[in-house]
Image (tube, helix red, strand yellow):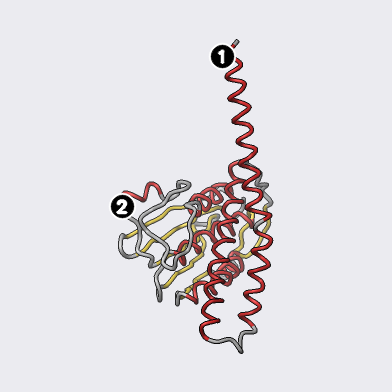
Amino acid sequence: MNDLSDIDSLSRQVEELMREKQHVISIVSHDLRSPLNRIFALVQLLQLNGSNLTGEQKDYLDKMHLIIADGLAMMRNLVDYRNLEYRTIDMLPETFNVGDLIETSVKNFKPIATKKSIEFRVECENNLMVTTDKHCLSRVIDNLLSNAVKFSAQEKKVWVRADTLLINHLKIEVQDEAGGFLSDEVAKLFQKFQKLSTRPTAGESTTGLGLFIAKSMAEKIGGKITCTTTEGLGSLFSVELPKTN
């Protein structure tokens, strides 16, 4: 009887810890995200109307922009991680132009890239249509671009390409000059909470979830993601997925 009682007690403790974990992630992802979004909007407003600001004040605003954007990205990854872990992502396929999705993602990351003098080069096949879950594919592209910008030094380039692969598949590539990964790290790239030797170049934070989420989201829409890396030079991430899913 004592053994059964101990097992029941441990089971209740585990359930309680899981509930607390979900509650903490919920607070981080929702209650904290709202005020950060408001502060981010205010910073952007000051930047747009900053003609009377000194150079030093503009520099502080740029740093605030980077820090807040970094924090919001971390929260989005925590939300994705929670949803993936508890399988609460509903697939909602729709037909859309991949080029438009890439353009939106690049536009979102351009302010941060510009502050590091990083240049985007986009090469996308015209009218490249796909039927899949738009949110999942967007999160794949966002996380690959985020990593490329985060780990690239000043005045580097990031290439984004998209074209048809065979007849019914497409390929999206994100290539960077971020220095690549060590050979013994390649097997760990897509595992969650991995902290590798490559470090952010402007003090950005990293949860070690970005590539895990990119891989998981790609797989949810029937795709796969691979990485070719050259230590000291950079990496090429390739996403292949069916045009209809």
Q: Position of residue 46 (x, y in %)?
A: 64, 79
Q: Is residue 189 left or right of residue 94?
A: left
Instruction: Say which of 95 and 86 sits in front.
Output: 86
Packing grade of label 1 (10 A; few <14, some 14-19, many >=20) is: few
Pointer 1 and pointer 2: residues touching (CB < 8 Å)? no
Q: Residue drawn at (56%, 53%), measured in percent from left and top? A: 242
Measure how far apart labels 1 and 2 are at the Cα level: 48 Å
Residue type beneath disc 1: Asp
Q: Position of residue 29 (x, y in %)?
A: 64, 53
Q: Nearer the viewer, residue 230 or 170?
A: 230
In the image, residue 73 above or below residue 219:
below
Compared to 14, does 200 lie above or below? below
Label 1: which secondary element = helix
Position of residue 194 measured from the top left corner of the image (x, y, whole percent) = 43, 49
Which numbered dot is residue 183? 2
Q: Which mark is residue 189?
A: none
- Residue drawn at x 58%, y 19% is 6
First along the sequence among labels 1 and 2: 1
Q: Residue at x 58, y 70 (%)?
A: 108
| Quadrant in the picture for the N terminus | top right
State the residue position of label 1: 3
Q: Is residue 234 above or below residue 12?
A: below
Q: Quadrant of residue 3?
A: top right
Sort mark 2 into few (<14), some (14-19) or many (20+) by Cα contacts within 10 Å. Answer: few
Q: Residue at x 48, y 67 (%)?
A: 160
Query: Given the image, on which type of amino acid does mark 2 rest?
Result: Ser
